[in-house]
Image: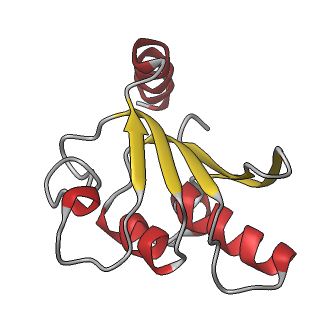
């Protein structure tokens, strides 16, 4: 699956969890990569917050995923491709820039954008 996410511990320099979108397979609209990676990490670490951890994602998180990212207190978010339709970190709702949210997240994006855009486009062309 081209839409994937992982949680990374920058202090220990290791990946805590990995996930990909399974919403179609699971018939569950909440089964986005970011949420699944957060849930796996919290279970593995036996804690409800991910202070000091980073999230890497293929695509800009949507509003639902962004809300869970803020609630889990993730430190930084990295994503390759902006999602101008439903992205909520730097597009549309611009949550990463909001002055109304008490938790601030550093957001970095646009790395390897062309490579990941082709990967996603080709994946969905094959599905249709």
Q: Nearer the viewer, residue 96 or 26?
A: 96
Q: Position of residue 111 (x, y in %)?
A: 45, 22
Is residue 74 found left or right of 36 in the rendered image? left
Q: In the rendered view, tell whether residue 42 sits above or below residue 98.
A: below
- Residue at (41, 51) in percent of width and height: 106
Q: Quadrant of residue 114?
A: top left
Horizontally, residue 80 falls left or right of residue 9, namely: left
The answer to whether residue 22 is visible is yes
Which of the two residues, 60 or 101, is positioned nearer the viewer here? 101
Number of numbered callouts drawn: 0
- What residue appears at the point 41 percent right and 20 percent down from the top-left corner? 113
Quadrant of image for the N terminus:
top right
Colouring convention used in this rendered image of the protein: secondary structure
Residue 80 position (above or below residue 121): below
Q: Is residue 116 left or right of residue 51?
A: left
The furthest residue to the left: 92
- Spot occupied by residue 53 in the image (x, y as percentages of width and height): 65, 60
- In the rendered image, the vertical position of residue 126 relative to residue 41, given as above or below: above
Residue visible at 17% across and 70% down in the picture: 99
Query: Where's the C terminus, which quadrant?
Result: top left
Is 1 on the left-hand or right-hand side of 64? right
Q: Residue at x 47, y 68 (%)?
A: 69
Residue 90 pos. (x, y %): 23, 48
Residue 29 visible in the picture: no
| Observer-nearest of 21 and 73 | 73
């Amino acid at each position: 699956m081209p839409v994937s996410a992982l949680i990374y511990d920058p202090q220990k320099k290791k990946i805590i969890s990995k996930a990909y979108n399974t919403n179609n397979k699971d018939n569950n609209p909440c089964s986005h990569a970011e949420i699944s990676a957060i849930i796996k990490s919290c279970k593995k670490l036996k804690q409800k917050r991910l202070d000091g951890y980073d999230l890497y994602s293929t695509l800009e998180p949507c509003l639902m995923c962004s809300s869970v990212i803020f609630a889990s207190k993730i430190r930084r978010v990295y994503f390759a491709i902006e999602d101008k339709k439903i992205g909520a970190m730097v597009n549309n709702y611009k949550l990463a820039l909001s002055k109304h949210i008490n938790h601030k997240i550093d957001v970095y994006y646009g790395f390897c954008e062309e490579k990941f855009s082709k990967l996603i486009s080709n994946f969905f062309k094959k599905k249709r």
